Image (cartoon, grey):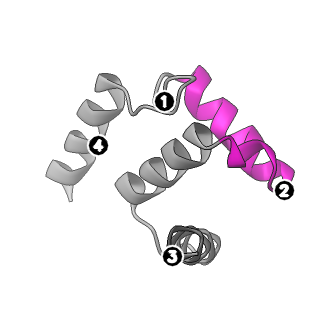
Amino acid sequence: MGRMKDISIDLISYELGELDSRETLELFALLVKSRMAYTLQGHYGRTADMLIHQGYLTPDGEVTEFAESMLEELEAAA
């Protein structure tokens, strides 16, 4: 149950707006990899599809090089 508890905490943190961009992308990468994005409420599947279509995630749930470069730019600007 350990990993499910971690995912639940991450989902709650996401819902509360407590995750930064990198943490959010990593959460959605995990949700896509596990296919959970498509079993949760519709927002998660739609957001996962948007991240895939915009080039931030692969359909297999890997964070793309494009996403990494964008995150580095965001972190440098902060």
Quadrant where the N terminus lies? bottom right
Residue beneath label 1, please? 57
Task: Categorize mark 3 by other alpha carbons within 10 Å: few (<14), some (14-19), many (20+).
Answer: few
For badge 4, the amino acid type reads Leu
Q: CA distance from mark 1 to mark 2?
A: 20 Å
Work out which residue is located at the far left of the displayed protein and give it: 76
Q: Evaluate if marks 4 and 2 touch, with contact meaning CB atoms under 8 Å apart.
A: no
Disc nearer the start of the sequence (3/4):
3
As measured in the structure, the alpha-carbon distance from the residue carrying label 3 to the one carrying label 1 is 25 Å
Q: Amino acid at mark 3?
A: Gly
Q: Is residue 16 left or right of residue 56?
A: right
Quick check: 39 above or below 66?
Answer: below
What's under tag 2, amino acid-wise? Gln
The tag on residue 41 is 2
Other residues around mark 4 within 10 Å, as few (<14) / some (14–19) / many (≥20): some
Q: CA distance from mark 3 to mark 4?
A: 28 Å
Cα–Cα span, label 4 and label 2: 26 Å
Residue 77 x, y percent position in the rendering = 19, 51
The magenta segment: 35-54
Foreground of the two, 6 or 58: 6
Q: Marks 4 and 2: which is nearer the front?
A: 2
Residue at the disc numbered 3: 2
Residue 40 vertical placement versus 37 (above, below): below
Image point (24%, 31%), residue name: 69
Q: Depth check: give the residue in front, 29 or 75.
A: 29
Front tag of 3 and 2: 3
Residue beneath the point at 45% across and 47% down:
25
User: Badge 4 is on which residue?
Assistant: 71
**Residue 45 is inside the magenta segment:** yes
